[in-house]
Image (cartoon, grey):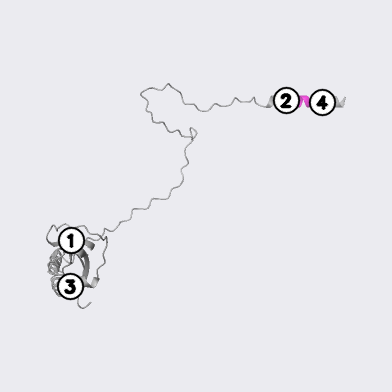
């Protein structure tokens, strides 16, 4: 009798627990985008689809404050090159060697010979404290002449008149003539020669 009672009570508890559970829910259908027939006027470019669930927004993470833009100092203003001589030089003939390295002293010595004249030009600067470097660029022709000289100063304190005076003095420099064989091998010599000008007391 007691065993039968426990069996009835167990069946009642199981039935009650079955009735207390909510009925199972039907699976929720995913959010669907209404479909329509494609039109010939539709753009053929595929659309990008976001995988983010509807109604949720991306978290806004704290961002570092944008630093204020730093002021960049403008580059120093360099005077334009000053050129004297023929505006158009004769076209150089083809030569066999890509690079030739003549003795530096052979080309520096004639320039040093006119240093006193370059110094006299420097003394004419309107600014008595003018100091700086002037880079001279020129080509030595086969007969040893210099047809055109360009000078560029690294500071506006050395004004154009001073640089022009120096370039005119360099045009008077003469080199030894070169043979046809030398020119056919190496071509004409291009020279870039910087000269630093300072006060005598410095």
Separation of residues labelled 1 and 3 (CA atoms): 22 Å
Which residue is tagged 3? Answer: 110
- Between disc 4 and disc 3, whose residue precedes? 4
Q: Earlier in the sequence, mark 2 or mark 1?
A: 2
- Whether residues under marks 2 and 4 lie with C-beta atoms below 8 angstroms apart, the answer is no
Mark 2 surroundings within 10 Å by alpha-carbon count, few (fewer than 14), some (14 through 19), many (20 or more) = few
The mark that comes first in sequence, 3 or 2, is 2
Question: What residue is pinned by disc 1?
Answer: 81
Residue at the disc numbered 2: 16
Query: Disc 2 or disc 4, which is closer to the eye?
Result: 4
Position of residue 96 measured from the top left corner of the image (x, y, whole percent): 25, 59
Circle 4: is it few (<14), some (14-19), or many (20+) Cα within 10 Å? few
* 143 in magenta: no
Q: Main secondary structure of the magenta part?
A: helix
The residue mark sitting in front, 2 or 1, is 1
How far across and how far down the image is residue 184, in percent? 21, 61
Q: Give the CA distance from mark 4 to mark 3.
A: 127 Å
* Disc 4, SS: helix
Residue depth check, mark 1 versus mark 3: number of the one nearer the observer: 3
The range drawn in magenta is 10-14
Residue furthest to the top in view is: 37
Residue identified by numbered label 4: 7
Q: Which one is earlier in the sequence, the residue at label 2 or at label 4? A: 4
């Amino acid at each position: 009798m007691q065993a039968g009672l426990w069996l009835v009570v167990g069946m009642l508890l199981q039935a009650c627990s079955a009735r207390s559970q909510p009925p199972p829910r039907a699976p929720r259908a995913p959010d669907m985008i209404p479909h329509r027939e494609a039109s010939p006027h539709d753009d053929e470019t595929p659309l990008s689809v976001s995988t983010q669930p509807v109604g949720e927004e991306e978290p806004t993470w704290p961002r570092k404050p944008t630093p204020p833009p730093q002021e960049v100092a403008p580059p120093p203003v360099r005077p334009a090159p000053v050129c004297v001589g023929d505006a158009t030089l004769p076209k150089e003939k083809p030569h066999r060697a890509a690079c030739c390295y003549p003795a530096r002293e052979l080309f520096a010595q004639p320039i040093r010979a006119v240093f006193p004249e370059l110094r006299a030009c420097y003394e004419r600067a309107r600014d008595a404290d003018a100091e700086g470097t002037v880079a001279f660029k020129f080509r030595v022709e086969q007969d040893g002449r210099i047809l055109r000289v360009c000078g560029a100063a690294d500071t506006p304190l050395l004004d154009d008149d001073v640089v022009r005076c120096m370039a005119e003095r360099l045009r008077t420099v003469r080199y030894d003539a070169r043979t046809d064989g030398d020119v056919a091998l190496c071509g004409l010599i291009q020279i870039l020669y910087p000269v630093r000008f300072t006060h005598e007391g410095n």
